Image: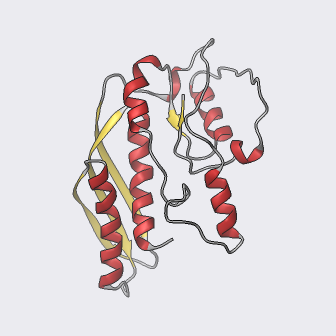
């Protein structure tokens, strides 16, 4: 991934956490650690990636910190306002239907292609996830619990069930591994 793509994805994954809780991201604080040999062009590419996503989601970058180090490291804090009730992981209850948005597996497929030496389109989900903000904002009042799918459906579903007091799950359809284990999807689980 290019530096611009890395910056964009780092912003998107942090915005996704806020959106998944039914919050509108407003401000971002960005901390970066950069190698001393980092060029002006590299810094511009990184900054442009942050700014592009911030603009797309109406987020104002209000500050942060830059330090020197061995490797590029990025830390982003998002300040948000709730759009009604908070959608938390801990409120699933017996009788709830569990569902998710979108089609899972694209990120797993993209990562597999990259690990085998292939390349991806800059619009591939693994590089540029699409966030379902409108879905969350319109449906949150009807949902008991929710979160984004960042570590794979299987892992994130187990977290949601555990945080809801170890609520169980009756599965009606067996899902393939590529769907269960595809992380970095940033679809909504609810």
Taking the spot 66% from the left edge, 72% from the top edge, the residue there is 118
Residue 152: x and y in percent read 63, 44
**Which of 149 and 100 lies nearest the eye of the viewer?**
100
Residue 147: x and y in percent read 50, 34
Task: Pick the quarter of the image with the C terminus.
Answer: top right
Determine whether 52 is above or below 37 in the image. above
Q: In which quadrant of the rendered view does residue 107 lie?
A: bottom right
Q: In which quadrant of the rendered view does residue 125 lie?
A: bottom right
Determine whether 62 is above or below 78 in the image. below
**Which of 92 and 122 lies nearest the eye of the viewer?**
122
Taking the spot 69% from the left edge, 47% from the top edge, the residue there is 181
Q: How is the image coloured?
A: secondary structure
Specify whether 67 is left or right of 181.
left
Specify whether 59 is left or right of 1.
left
Residue 17: x and y in percent read 43, 42
Taking the spot 56% from the left edge, 48% from the top edge, the residue there is 185
Taking the spot 37% from the left edge, 83% from the top edge, the residue there is 38
Q: In which quadrant of the rendered view does residue 159 lie?
A: top right
Determine whether 142 is above or below 133 in the image. above
Determine whether 76 is above or below 1 in the image. above
Residue 23: x and y in percent read 34, 34
Total count of labels: 0
**Which of 14 and 49 lies nearest the eye of the viewer?**
49
Specify whether 52 is left or right of 179.
left
């Amino acid at each position: 991934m290019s530096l611009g793509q890395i910056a964009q994805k780092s912003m998107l994954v942090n915005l996704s956490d806020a959106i998944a809780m039914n919050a509108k991201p407003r401000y971002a604080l960005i901390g970066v650690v950069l190698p001393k040999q980092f060029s002006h062009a590299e810094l511009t590419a990184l900054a442009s990636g942050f700014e592009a996503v911030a603009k797309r989601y109406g987020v104002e970058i209000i500050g942060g910190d830059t330090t020197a180090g061995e490797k590029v490291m990025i830390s982003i804090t998002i300040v948000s306002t709730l759009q009604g009730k908070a959608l938390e992981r801990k409120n699933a209850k017996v009788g709830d239907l569990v569902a998710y948005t979108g089609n899972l597996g694209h990120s797993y497929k993209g990562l597999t292609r990259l690990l085998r030496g292939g390349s991806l389109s800059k619009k591939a989900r693994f590089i540029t996830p699409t966030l379902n903000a409108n879905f969350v904002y319109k449906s949150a009042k009807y949902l008991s619990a929710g979160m984004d799918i960042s570590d794979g459906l299987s892992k994130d579903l187990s977290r949601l069930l555990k945080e809801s007091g170890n609520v169980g799950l009756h599965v009606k359809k067996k899902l393939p591994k590529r769907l269960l284990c595809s992380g970095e999807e940033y679809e909504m689980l609810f």
